[in-house]
Image (tube, rainbow, N blue to C red):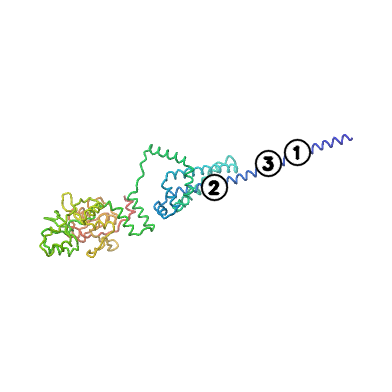
Amino acid sequence: MNCDIIHAKAVVGSWGFVLLKLSSRVAHRRCERQLVLSFMDSHSTTLLLILLFLIVLSGYFSATETAFSSLNRIRLKNLAAAGNKRAKLAYALSEQYDELLSTILVGNNLVNIASTAIATVLFISAVGAEAGPTVSTIVMTVVVLIFGEVGPKSLAKENAESFAMISAPMIRILIVILKPVNFLFTLLKSGLKKWFRVGSKQSVTDSELLTIVEEAEQEGGIDEDESAMLRNVIEFDDIEAIDVMTPRVDVEAISKDTPKEEIARLFRETGYSRLPVYEESIDSIAGVIHEKNFYAYVWGTDRPIDDILKPAEFIPPSMKISDLLKLLQQNKLHMAVIVDEFGGTEGIVTLEDVLEELVGEIWDEHDEVVQETFRKLNDDTYLIQCSADLDDLFEFFHIRCETEASTINGWFTEHLDRVPETGDSFEYEGLVFTVTRAENNRAEEISVKGEPLPEREMEEDG
């Protein structure tokens, strides 16, 4: 019996040992599972934080690219000249734009690829291996598009110079780090330029400068008068002498045989300080006399006007007024005679005519101020002086017309096929043009009946 008891105790003891061992294994496995879950949670949190940081970097690179591509380099240069160190650094970086752009693009692509990979790992652990990549692609596309592209670029465009100055220090560091990569991209770019024969960078054109002036006026940087003067300066090289001349029919000239009393009367009535002098006809200009010299050396004496005659400068109608201005300055002259292809006098142009193309009309105490060239009489009728430029007439009424005429009178003569007279009229593009005053075989004043055609309709018709 004692043996049976001893045997029973042994059996019970062995089972207890087995149960104790099993329970310890379960506890150990439970602890391992908790450690794994705890590690996975901390690992996911770390990946999530890294992902958020990469998205911020993506937005930073996108905003920097937009800021440097749309900034006003003139404004940034002025800030740098004023002593702003960040502006100076940003301007220096904009000067090496190719290296700057490759650095930004490399950095942006690296952070986007890394963020996509991390997001895929997180979504696989969250929703499984099958749906994880798809969900990651959809979510990351939306997130990068909003927070890494559209949003940052919109903000950077509105504050381009400020953001460029803020991001300049970090970009400079990245340029140094990615110097070998940028060198490879520079070689690749050179090869592509040779392969595709890409031309050199074009300079700023006159039309682009005019657009810059117009935008500066709209933004309030310059006023209307400053804008008009800048436009005149930009367009100065495109104007020919014939465009600003006084035609021969309006030229006040004298013959060498003109009595001195008549010369004095002409000086007094016209208020001119200089008069052209011709020998047989106005087509043979001999020179120019000055009012001051006339009264100082000729008036009240027996001396002829040949003694005070200054040589005249003859120029072709096509000469640019920028070249004419230099010519008059070099020769110390104030007047030039425009001759046609047959050598006859076509008109004269003075230094004042040239300067008025830069600063607008110049009036002195002897000038008779003329009325407006374009004057509105009522709702649909305009009174126009024929001294106005034909291009201004076309622009005002949005007229499209191919013509050889350079003046309003010439355009009327072309349409009527004869010399215009008072009362002559014709209709063109829905507008009625009528000669209201004609003198000396030419139209002096016209009326136009009809509203100017809106520019939008003109573009649609075109």
Crowding near the residue tagged with mark 1, few <14, some 14–19, many ≥20 C-alpha atoms within 10 Å: few
Q: Amino acid at mark 1?
A: Lys
Q: Secondary structure at mark 3?
A: helix
| Residue 258 x %, y % | 11, 60
Q: Residue at x 89, y 35 (%)?
A: 2
For discs 2 and 3, the disc positioned in front in the rendered view: 2
Crowding near the residue tagged with mark 3, few <14, some 14–19, many ≥20 C-alpha atoms within 10 Å: few
Q: Quadrant of residue 447?
A: bottom left
- For the residue pair 280 and 157, the one nearer the viewer reads as 280
Q: Amino acid at mark 3?
A: Glu
Q: Which residue in the protein does label 1 denote? A: 21
Q: Secondary structure at mark 2?
A: helix
Crowding near the residue tagged with mark 2, few <14, some 14–19, many ≥20 C-alpha atoms within 10 Å: some
Q: Which residue in the protein does label 2 denote? A: 53
Q: CA distance from mark 1 to mark 2?
A: 48 Å
2 or 3: tag closer to the N-terminus:
3
Residue 147 located left or right of residue 280: right
- Asked if the residue under mark 3 is in contact with the one under mark 2, i.e. CB atoms within 8 Å, the reply is no
Q: Amino acid at mark 2?
A: Phe
1 or 2: tag closer to the N-terminus:
1
As drawn, the residue found furthest toward the right would be 1
Q: CA distance from mark 3 to mark 1?
A: 17 Å
Q: Which residue in the protein does label 3 denote? A: 32
For the N terminus, the image quarter is top right
- Asked if the residue under mark 1 is in contact with the one under mark 3, i.e. CB atoms within 8 Å, the reply is no
